[in-house]
Amino acid sequence: MHFIINGQNHALDLDSRTSLLDLVRDHLLLTGTKKGCNQGACGACTVLVDGERINSCLALAVQYQDRTITTIEGLVSANALHPLQQAFIEHDGFQCGYCTPGQICSAIGMMAEMEHGVPSAITADLAGETVQLTHDELRERMSGNLCRCGAHNGIIQAIQDSFAE
Ligand code: FES
């Protein structure tokens, strides 16, 4: 099977039942992506496929051959953190950090889901009207990613700060 992960090509002989999560963690040792519930409930395993966020624990790797897959490791460029990674640090958007890679990938995917690409602010064009998403609306859009430490306020503030420029 052939995969494109974080811009690198990988040819692997895999069992067809291998999940995308096990592919990145166990076969490629990209352990930034976490295994939490392993049943689609916590979001710790979130990665980006062609820019869309998915729970990699529920995805069979074989179905994602030749797609553009990005894990948390792929967000760093030229040894600089992604702006959202930096914002998580500045806003204490984590405590134990286990959910953080999934939170960050999910937030990036969330912004991509909005129409007109990544907006210049936390806005969505709804029925032709540009509105600013509230803290609660962002919480709702991020509800697939759990944080057992309760760092949600910092997480949302980091997202707002990162994308508000
Ligand atoms: Fe995939 Fe929890 S480990 S959603």
Image (spheres, helix red, strand yellow):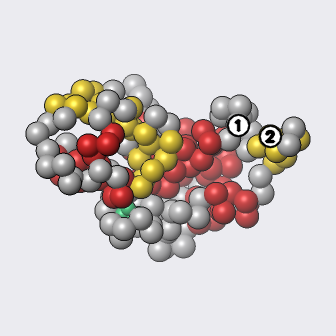
Q: Tell me: 158 left or right of 101.
A: right
- In percent of width and height, residue 105 lies at 48, 47
The structure residue drawn at horizontal position 50% and vertical position 42%, both measured from the top left corner, is 52
Q: Is residue 30 visible?
A: no
Spatial distance from mark 2 to mark 1, Cα to Cα?
A: 7 Å
**Residue that lies at the very extreme toward the left in this rendered image:** 13
Q: Which residue is mark 2?
A: 125
Label 2 secondary element: strand
Q: Residue at x 55, y 38 (%)?
A: 83
At label 1, the amino acid type is Glu
The dot on residue 115 is: 1
Indicate the quadrant containing the N terminus: top left, top right, bottom left or bottom right.
top left
Residue 61 visible in this rendered orientation of the protein: yes
Q: Residue at x 59, y 59 (%)?
A: 142
Badge 1 marks a residue whose secondary structure is: loop
Identify the amino acid type marked 2: Asp
Tag 2 near tag 1, CB within 8 Å: yes
Quadrant where the C terminus sits is: top right
Query: Would you say 64 lies left or right of 27 here?
Result: right
Image quadrant where residue 111 sits: top right
In this picture, is 82 found above or below 158? above
Instruction: Establish if 24 lies above or below 81.
Output: below
